[in-house]
Image (tube, grey):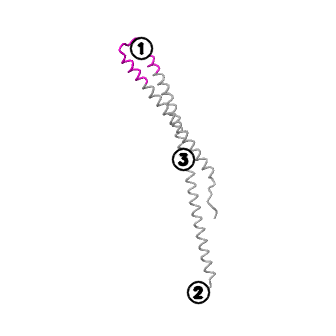
Amino acid sequence: MNAFRFPLEKVLAWRRSELELAELKFQQLTAAVAAVDKALAELETAGIRAEILVRDWSPVCGRDLAALGNFRLHVRKKNTELAARRAECAGRLAAGRGAMLEARRRLRLLERLKQRRLEDWRIARDKELEELASESYLARWVGHPHAAGE
């Protein structure tokens, strides 16, 4: 009997590489969301530090308060920009997750098909070996004159 050969092996390999690529892209998108989250946290920290710093000054003048007000406006604007960027990254992350899960599903489908085909091949091989063994056993009995009861 011939060795097992899965005719869709190239497609299976391509699906594996497709999944690896989707997983890599998903990791990159996850890192992008994490980077935006980190920038948001740093921005919040900078705002809090500025507030604390100005409140600790004993003689506070109008320019200092004006600068703090401008910084607060800058922080709000930057926070809005980062929130919009995070929403965009989160949307791409969701799409990337969907693509990765779909690639994983298609790969598993082909892997299950390969397993089924391999099992069918093993059953056919075992049946062929059993038939060959039976024929060999019968041939041995037919070839011996004492086997027929003489």
Compared across the picture, whether 15 is left or right of 68 comes to: right
Q: Amino acid at mark 2?
A: Gly
Q: Quadrant of the C terminus?
A: bottom right
- On the image, the x and y values in percent for residue 94 come to 51, 37
Q: Amino acid at mark 1?
A: Asp
**Residue 64 numbered tag:** 1
Q: In the rendered image of this protein, does residue 15 appear above or below residue 85?
A: below
Query: Which residue is pictured at 62% across the width and 56% down the height?
Result: 6
Whether pointer 1 and pointer 2 mark residues with C-beta atoms closer than 8 Å, the reply is: no
- On the image, the x and y values in percent for residue 72 come to 44, 19
Secondary structure state at the residue bearing disc 3:
helix
The magenta span reads 46-74
Q: In the rendered image of this protein, does residue 66 appear above or below residue 110?
A: above
- On the image, the x and y values in percent for residue 120 come to 58, 61
Residue 57 occupies quadrant: top left
Query: Which residue is pictured at 50% across the width and 27% down the height?
Result: 84
Mark in front: 3 vs 1: 1
Disc 3 and disc 1: Cα gap in Å?
Answer: 59 Å
Q: Which residue is mark 3?
A: 105
- Numbered disc total: 3
Q: Earlier in the sequence, mark 2 or mark 3?
A: 3
